[in-house]
Every structure is written in structure tokens, then in C-alpha cells.
Amino acid sequence: MDKNAVLTFDIIGRRKVWYILSTVLILPGIISLLVWHLNVGIDFKGGSQQDISFSQAPNIDQVRKDLDGAHIDGVAVQTSGDKDVIVRFPDQKDLQPRDVGNNVLTALKKEDANLKEVSFESIGGLVAHTTIVNAIWAVLITSIAIILFIAWSFRAVPAPASSWRFGVTAILALAHDVLFVIGAFSLIGHFFPQIEVDSLFITAILTILGFSVNDTIVTFDRVRENLRRSPGKSFAEIVSSSLNQTLARSINTSGTVLLVLLALLILGGESVRNFILALTLGVAIGTYSSIFNAAPLLVSWQNWVDAHTVAPVRRKK
């Protein structure tokens, strides 16, 4: 066997398999979104957040029991550090947020009379609605900017490729990533109420968009180079060889990032755990879609264009 031989994978030839797998990956999340929706935090539904510091490490189960006895609807508790606890609760019908916060302190002082309130913040319904609108606009504007940037960057791509097809297929792959992460949070949040969608989640989504498109652009750039170097090859062959040339780079880059994120997910604090979880899921699925969705979609689209392009008929003189 030739020592210089390079192991290649027929990713493009099996693209229908990847399309089916992608559908299987995002379908449960879509169903969960339709049935259970998202478990949103106070950033999106309004409510209050209270950071309480105990004199010694609290028993979180006992804290939850004490708050259940205070009859506060929708209260959620999570640890923050060794001695701090974050309490979140939606707006109550008959009480002002500050009064509910005082009731929380009273209930918890039965266990620790020396606890202190570190911070208290309340977000009204109007602010929450504005946050939702701004989040949607942020994702839409980012997606449009990515399409325009890729179309402009690949404007000189050789025929038969189109710079606009490069941009649109990249966004389709990113849409797959975003749907997967949002659907996963809907599914996980239904069974684990502490997994909430907040403003940090939107930050994670925008970060995922940037990271995923970077991998896709690397592959597309190699496709552009190979189109110039090998004009006699078919478009599918060029994309396939380009994928294999960038495969190791994509996996190695994403693998090192995932190792760091997994360490943070296991050892990091509760306050950033949802953010790290979203990034971990996003980087993993983004790596998959950059390899198995973006480039294969480019080939499928090109094949469709070729099949529906009518060659000009030459008239006899």
C-alpha cells in the first residue's frame, strides 16, 4: 500500500443518508417545541431573580422545601458557588416582586438566620417582550449578514458554482444547527426545569452561528480553489475531494473546543451551565452540519440546476 495514500470518505455520494440523519436529529426537538414550547427564564417572561448568600453551604433540597412551604408559584432554585443560591420566580398575582422577595428571605431564614441578600432584580413583562423581539432581530440580521458576506467573498467563484448558492446553503446548515439546539433545550427543559432559555442562550446561539459558518467557509474556500485547479472534474468530485482535504482540520479544531466546553460543563458553576450546554450542543452539531450538510446541499442544488438547465439549440445555417 502506498504510504502517501490519503484515506478518503465518500461523503457526497451518501448525502441522502446525511439528510435523513439530520431530519432524525432535529425532528424530536421540533415536536417538543410544538407540544411543550421552551422553558424560558425571567429574561423572556418577566419575573424576579434573587441572589442569596448563606453563612455555610446550604442543603439545596431543604431550600426547595422551605420555598414550597412559602407558597410562591413557579419558584426555581439553583446553586451559585459554595454558599450562594439563586432564586427565580415569575410575577405573582397579589404581591409586588419586592414583597415576594421578602417572603423568600423569611422562609429561608428558618434554616440560616445569618443569610444575606446579595442582589435582587425584577424584569417586567414589557422588558421581557422587548428582549424577545431584539433576540429574533439579532438572529435574523446575523443570518442575512452571513449570506451577504459569503456571496461577496465568493463572487469570483468559477462556473458552474454560484456565490449566492454558497451563501444560502451555509445558512441552511446554520438553520439546522439552531433548530437542533433550540429543540434540544425544549426537550431537556421539559424534563429538567432548571434548564432555561435566557439572554445568555441568545448569546450562545449567535456564537454558534459564527463558529459553524467558519468551518463551512473553510470547506467552501477549498472548493473554490479546486474549481480553479481542476476545471475538468465534475462539481461533485471537486466538492468531495475538498471535504476530505479539510475534514481533519474541522474535526481537530472542533474537538479541542469541545474538550474545553465539556470541562466547563462538568466543573463550571450553575450560573453559566445552561450557556455552556448550549455552546457544547451547538459546536457538536455545527461540526456535523459543516461536513455533512453544507457541502452536500451545495452539490444537490448544483445537480438540480444542471438538470433543469436547457442547453441552447444551435440553428442550422
Image (cartoon, grey):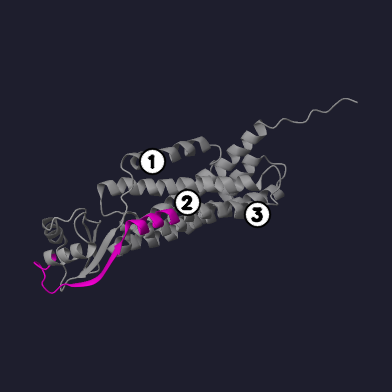
Which amino acid type is marked by label 3? Trp
Q: CA distance from mark 2 to mark 1?
A: 20 Å
Give the spatial CA distance, label 3 vs label 2.
Answer: 24 Å
Q: Is residue 9 left or right of residue 134?
A: right
Q: Secondary structure at mark 2?
A: helix
Where residue 223 sits: x, y (%)?
Answer: 63, 49
Quadrant (top left/top right/bottom left/bottom right) for the C terminus: top right
Q: Position of residue 55 (x, y in %)?
A: 15, 74
Which residue type does callout 2 highlight?
Thr
Q: Pinpoint residue 44: horizontal percent, then vertical percent.
A: 35, 55
Residue 118 screen position, x and y as percent: 24, 72
Q: Residue furthest left?
A: 110
Q: Which mark is residue 287?
A: 2
**In magenta stretch: residue 246:** no
Pick out the residue farthest to the right: 317
Taking depth in this image into account, of 279 and 235 the one nearest to the observer is: 279
Question: Between disc 3 and disc 2, whose residue precedes?
Answer: 3
User: Which numbered circle lies on residue 30?
Assistant: 1
Find numbered disc 3 in the image and state the secondary structure of the residue it sits on.
Answer: helix
